[in-house]
Image (spheres, rainbow, N blue to C red):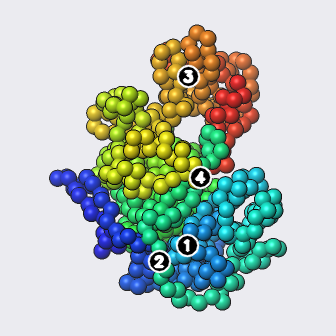
């Protein structure tokens, strides 16, 4: 029996589809002790991690080995004064050490803050000044250590500086310390309500916000892994994500181990579709999840065979139906889309037993009471646009929903208006209960008395062969209040000129209702983006 059943109760409808999942766990639940160490005791030879890199190196770590390695790492950090509630910044790319360090921090009751290796010095300074860190653990690659050291010097702080694998000036080699450390570690007192992680959002508007989750957060990903990823006991799940993002918690550790699946980790810098598929086939990955960008690349290159993959899903942005169709034609697999936020776990998805519809976010998670709320506080009817909200059983206490914004109680209270969590995302629901993304409320364009979701226009605009990236924004218009503007980046072989602008506009408008028409268009060499690759529409608006 998969260990997840110890911590939840499942209710199914007459067709065998999950109707409701309720978490049930002790006050001192701790993922490291109650899941990792428990599996290690019962099935020490069970695979936890299958890791490889582009150089051909590989490492398979069992739960028995992981338990001892994390005890060693916990002893190293405890000896350095790291304890319950202390924050530790982690920048370890896709190195297998990430999993060891993360579980070790959980054993200590410390708070992990994963960050991407792509952060600039200023990005790091912002995080250091926002949250005091007791230690930093980083990769020796990409001059991450150099930027960390420079940022620390600018702030005047004095965290412990550790590197992995190699000696770096100004850093202590964490890997060497682990070699000498004891592999025995006594359980420390922690509570399920203690903080476990601090994530900085990608900041599509304004500076990144610090999002805090507690020790119960991993359990909310049972639904993610079991019913969306459809990860299997004894299987091998592969989510394409770098460890600096919350997506790693969704697809590369918690839910997968809870349901008994190992996680596949491919340590790479530059995405190569062919190499990715080679890894999938070599290690016989059984379930796969990636952002739409990866599927677009795979489809463009001529979708190769992946015979071991039984199930595939996607999240991060809306998937264009054409990519869905081509992927299904090539593989026989239907892509299951999902939706959630850094602040939550999975909110809606095309779950097990739900027939996926291209472009749909799926149905409400059985973990949450999800509704669409209009501005007047009433629930949106079928076909009406409303804000996606979560109504918890207890006020400000929904499983897997974050417990606070870092040092910003006012902002936290504002998204928990009247005891309801407001996502800020707009959608509508059809008669079969499927949700369809409409846009961010702060991105929705009001033009001539109409409300237009940018995606509705972008989804058509991107189909023009000259357009490789696009963003649609509302700009001031004395007649309409706002008019619709398209900002595009051209593909290779296309040159910016007025004739092409006119062609793109006419191509798009001929496929849209008149109230959604693009009024102006601008061609850029590149889009302003966040460090995670999301287009910063706030910058596009400020420029105008």
Give me the disc on residue 84: 1
Give me the disc on residue 407: 4
Could you tell me which secondary element the residue under label 3 belongs to? helix
Give the residue at x 44% y 53%.
401
Of callouts 2 and 1, which one flags the residue occurring earlier in the amino acid sequence? 1
Could you tell me which secondary element the residue under label 4 belongs to? loop
Of callouts 4 and 2, which one flags the residue occurring earlier in the amino acid sequence? 2
Tag nearer the camera, 4 or 3: 4
Residue 142 sits in quarter? bottom right
How far is the residue under mark 2 from the one under mark 1?
Answer: 9 Å
Residue 71 in the image, given as x and y percentages of width and height: 55, 83
Disc 2 target residue: 189
Looking at the image, residue 422 sits to the left or right of residue 77; the answer is left
How far is the residue under mark 3 from the one under mark 2?
Answer: 60 Å
Give the residue at x 28% y 33%.
431
Pointer 2 with pointer 1, Cβ within 8 A: yes
Of callouts 3 and 2, which one flags the residue occurring earlier in the amino acid sequence? 2
Of callouts 1 and 4, which one flags the residue occurring earlier in the amino acid sequence? 1
For the residue pair 496 and 522, the one nearer the viewer reads as 522
């Amino acid at each position: 029996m998969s260990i997840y059943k110890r911590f939840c109760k499942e209710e199914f409808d007459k067709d065998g589809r999950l109707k409701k999942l309720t978490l049930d766990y002790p006050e001192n639940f701790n993922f490291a002790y109650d899941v990792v160490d428990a599996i290690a005791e019962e099935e020490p030879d069970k695979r936890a991690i299958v890791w490889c890199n582009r150089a051909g190196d590989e490492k398979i770590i069992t739960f028995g080995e992981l338990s001892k390695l994390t005890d060693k790492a916990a002893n190293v950090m405890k000896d350095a004064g790291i304890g319950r509630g202390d924050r530790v910044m982690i920048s370890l790319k896709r190195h297998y050490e990430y999993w060891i360090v993360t579980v070790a921090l959980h054993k200590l009751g410390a708070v992990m803050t994963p960050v991407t290796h792509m952060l600039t010095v200023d990005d790091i300074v912002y995080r250091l000044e926002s949250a005091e860190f007791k230690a930093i653990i980083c990769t020796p690659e990409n001059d991450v250590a150099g930027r960390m050291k420079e940022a620390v010097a600018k702030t005047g702080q004095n965290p412990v500086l550790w590197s992995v694998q190699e000696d770096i000036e100004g850093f202590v080699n964490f890997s060497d310390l682990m070699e000498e450390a004891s592999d025995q570690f006594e359980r420390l007192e922690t509570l399920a309500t203690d903080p476990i992680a601090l994530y900085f959002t990608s900041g599509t508007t304004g500076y990144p916000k610090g999002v805090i989750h507690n020790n119960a957060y991993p359990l909310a990903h049972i639904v993610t892994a079991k019913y969306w990823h459809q990860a299997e006991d004894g299987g091998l799940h592969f989510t394409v994500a770098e460890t600096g993002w919350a997506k790693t918690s969704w697809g590369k550790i918690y839910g997968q181990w809870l349901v008994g699946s190992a996680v596949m980790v491919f340590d790479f810098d530059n995405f190569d579709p062919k190499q990715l598929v080679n890894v999938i086939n070599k290690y016989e990955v059984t379930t796969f999840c990636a952002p739409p960008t990866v599927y677009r690349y795979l489809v463009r290159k001529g979708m190769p065979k992946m015979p071991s993959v039984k199930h595939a899903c996607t999240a991060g942005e809306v998937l264009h139906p054409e990519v869905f169709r081509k992927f299904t034609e090539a593989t026989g697999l239907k892509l299951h889309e999902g939706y959630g936020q850094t602040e939550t776990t999975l909110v809606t998805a095309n779950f097990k037993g739900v027939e996926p519809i291209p472009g749909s976010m799926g149905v409400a998670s059985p973990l949450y009471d999800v509704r669409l709320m209009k501005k007047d506080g009433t629930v949106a009817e079928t076909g009406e646009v409303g804000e996606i909200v979560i109504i918890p059983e207890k006020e400000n206490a929904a499983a897997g929903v974050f417990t606070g914004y870092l040092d910003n109680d006012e902002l936290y209270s504002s998204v928990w208006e009247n005891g309801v969590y407001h996502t800020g995302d707009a959608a509508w629901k059809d008669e079969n209960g499927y949700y369809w993304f409409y846009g961010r409320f702060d991105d929705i364009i009001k033009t001539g008395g109409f409300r237009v979701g940018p995606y509705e226009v972008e989804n058509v605009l991107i189909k023009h062969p000259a357009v490789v990236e696009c963003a649609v924004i509302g700009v001031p218009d004395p007649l309409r209040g706002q008019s619709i503007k398209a900002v595009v980046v051209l593909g290779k072989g296309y040159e910016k000129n007025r004739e092409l602008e006119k062609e793109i506009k006419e191509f798009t408008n001929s496929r849209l209702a008149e109230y959604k028409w693009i009024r102006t268009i601008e061609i850029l060499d590149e889009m302003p983006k966040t460090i995670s690759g999301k287009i910063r529409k706030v910058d596009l608006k400020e420029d105008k």
